[in-house]
Amino acid sequence: MPKHFRMIDNARRTLTAIENSAVDELLAGRMDRRDFLRHGSVLGLSLPFLGSLVAAAGLGTQQARAEGKPGGTVRAGVATPGGAIDPVTYYDSGSYQLVFQTAEFLCITQPDLTLKPVLAESWAPNEDGSVWTFKLRKGVKFHNGEDFKADDVVATFDRLADPNGASNALSVFKGLLSKGGTQKVDDHTVAFHLDAPNGSFPYSVSIDNYNAVILPASYKGDYEKTFEGTGPFRLETYTPKVGATFIRNTDYWGEKALPDRLEFKFYGDVQPRILALQAGEVDILDAVPLDVSQVVLNSPDITVLRVASTAHRQLHMRCDTGPFTDKRVRQALALCIDRSKLVDGLCRGMAATGNDSPFAPAFPATDKTVPQRVQDIAKAKQLLEAAGLASGFDITLTTLRYSDIPGYAQLFQNFAKEIGARISLNIEDQDKYYGKAVFGQSDWLDSPLGITDYAHRSVPNVFLKSPLVSDGPWNAAHFKSPAYDGMVTSYLKALDVGAQRAAASDIQKLLLDETPVIFSYFPDLLVPVRKNVSGLPPIAAGLLLDRVSLS
């Protein structure tokens, strides 16, 4: 037996049936290197171990990253935080970009969507994925000197899953993890007892869920006073509405941060941020919208990191309100769209084409054999005629003034004219559009036709549940389908890739038929940095600055 086959065979003897099924998929060519690393990391297998299997299978090795030089102050320009910063409740980029420097997660996603252990050393599911056990890192201290232990993890997730609290993470944990479901096994082991089996649960306690930073069990609020955490930087100063500074944590448990200091400056709008970058007042910005990207793309002193993202704009049609009670009308609007013009024109080629389901091309489970929906004006008109709307119809599209969305709304308005759909635009400020974000008190959730921004996720779970299941809290389409709900349950609980793919394929086909929501494109995330900046990891979740260096 050749040496590399012997290595794989020996390794397989240590793996569970679910883990071996992933190896089967890799060796049979049904899973590529990237998907194998991603799926194996979700199951809790170490990345070095997975890399050795990939190398033994003759599929390449991981490239070592060049390390930058230590020292200096890295300056970042970010949006002004929306209010008092509290990791339990915050939802805005300006807040969590700061917290990511001082507090840490059990694990974080990497550019290839693999999961890297941070405060957890390893994890593993039980046979059906209803219980996930995490082994915690030893020798870690919070900035206040307290030891990091299982009690801190239990307290963190009980806060986030408390239905009587104000946690922003309830959108992730509702129906997944209840208060009391996180249980201490010993000082360095916790077991998450889930409300239902889930095949990709570790993403829910990773940086993908930006509220899931681990806080001390003693946390009572007033986060801005301390920015308490276990991270590579600690708070130096914080001035609301102005900025913050952080210094290297010399007692950090891992590799010490390269920069001596971080300086964050707050800006109320994206244009002043871009001007500050061009003037050399800051070195890095958080992601900029597509509609202003051309300004920095053409600058000789600026590099724009393009990060493939699963962020998207959901164009919902209320299935309980005429004329959208008839799925033929919904299909007609989806067919009137020229998606190539959206990707190549509106997004300047920096996007992936959507096929009217949350399954972006970046997701490993996406069934790429499902035919891509393309513009077909003749068929769209036939569908409207069959629905009794041969002369078209009038409707108002309500949306928000954010990034490329107004441009998308105008293009959609023009596309719809070609099939006789007369659309008026109502473009609102974000606060008015979202309202109280509950049914009956939100233009987002109550409008018959609307476009809403959805941020990146490394797995489609939130996209599949909150906006589309029958009782979803973000179900702006008011879509109710027991068949769909059952498919989502099957997808979420699947531990092996084959079962995930089968459920994903069923979901994609059902949503193409029902078309409660149009998913036209998935824009890249664009992060501008000065040319002298290196080491910023190209992940869609946010800025991690500990390995950044300046030349």
Image (cartoon, rainbow, N blue to C red):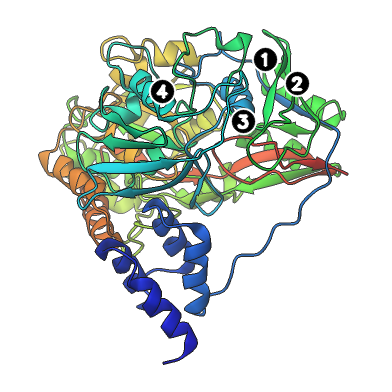
- Give the Cα distance between marks 3 and 2: 29 Å
Question: For the residues carrying marks 3 and 2, which lies nearer the camera in this image?
Answer: 3
Q: Name the residue tied to disc 1.
A: 268
- Give the Cα distance between marks 1 and 3: 27 Å
**Residue 408 location (% of width, % of height):** 49, 35
Please tell me which of labels 4 and 3 falls first in the chain: 4
Please tell me which of labels 4 and 1 falls first in the chain: 4
Residue contact at pointers 2 and 1, CB within 8 angstroms: yes
**Residue 112 location (% of width, % of height):** 53, 54
Q: Name the residue tied to disc 4.
A: 156
Q: Name the residue tied to disc 3.
A: 231
**Residue 441 location (% of width, % of height):** 31, 9
**Any mark on residue 272, and which?**
2
**Any mark on residue 332, and which?**
none
Q: Quadrant of the C terminus?
A: top right
* Residue type at numbered disc 1: Gly
